[in-house]
Image (spheres, helix red, strand yellow):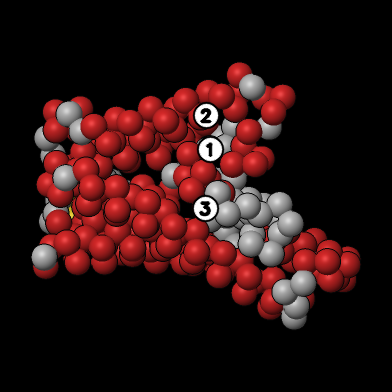
Amino acid sequence: MNIYTNFNSDAVKHLISINILVYTATFVFSQYKIESFLSLYHPLDERFELYQILTHMFVHSKRLFLHIIFNMLALFMFGGQIETLLGIKKFMIIYFFSGFFAALLQIIFNTSVMYYFLHTLDFYQAKKALDSLNEEQKITLYSSMYSPMMGASGAVSGVVGAFARFFPEHKIFILPFPFPIAVEKAIMIFIFGSFLSAILNLAPGVAHFAHIGGILSGYFIGSFFLKR
């Protein structure tokens, strides 16, 4: 991987800059609670706005600094190669379409969790039914219904998925393995781990299916561009 290529990637540099500016703004203008209206709420939630489908990709958790660090690091490492290979237009298609499909898959999963526990898609009825659940179920359901999605994870995952399509044998490190493995194998391991984490609720509050949706979207969009 040529790191100098990453420094010369205009779209990647601008995306990283915008993310950092928005993250900084959430602290400097904290009284306006920027993250609360830029994040993506469930479409059945009264706080949902159409523009959030785009804006949630540029806002990150104030409580978890590593959230933006890991996303921007991955975007820098993998994005430059894809932008150089495909050009800005196709790179942006991968980035934003992956972010959109990542959010869509997570919303579908969250909706299925809500229906599984409460047998309704009515948010008003769901609120009244929460008291009938145990604490673990309440936490799971609350994170699915009311916790908004935020972050570039889905879009960045799409870039990683596209990278795996174009450079499947490129070696990267992935925890907990102490040795580098091919990126295509790495994303398979990551998808499997994310799926288990989502189903078993191993990390509440993490949008596992957004990561899965982003990787798969980027991989398949990359495949489409590869055949053209």
Asked if the residues shown at circle 2 and circle 1 are in contact, with their CB atoms under 8 angstroms apart, the answer is yes
Which callout, 2 or 3, points at the residue further toward the start of the chain?
2
Residue depicted at 24% across the width and 56% down the height: 162
Which callout, 2 or 1, points at the residue further toward the start of the chain?
2
State the image coordinates of residue 224 (x, y, percent, origin top left): 19, 66
* Disc 1, SS: loop
Q: Nearer the viewer, residue 90 or 30?
A: 90
Residue depicted at 62% across the width and 74% down the height: 112
Q: Is residue 221 above or below residue 175?
A: below
Mark number for residue 23?
2
Q: CA distance from mark 3 to mark 1?
A: 14 Å
Which callout, 3 or 1, points at the residue further toward the start of the chain?
3
Q: Nearer the viewer, residue 116 or 224?
A: 224
Q: Residues within 10 Å of mark 2 (few under 14, many from 20)?
A: many
- Kind of residue at badge 2: Tyr
Q: Quadrant of residue 219?
A: bottom left
Determine which residue is flagged by label 1.
Answer: 60
Q: CA distance from mark 2 to mark 1?
A: 6 Å
Residue at the farthest bottom position: 119
Determine which residue is flagged by label 3.
Answer: 53
Q: Is residue 36 left or right of residue 222?
A: right
Disc number lying in front (3 or 1): 3
State the image coordinates of residue 60 (x, y, percent, origin top left): 53, 37
Is residue 190 something that shows in the picture?
no
Residue depicted at 63% across the width and 33% down the height: 34
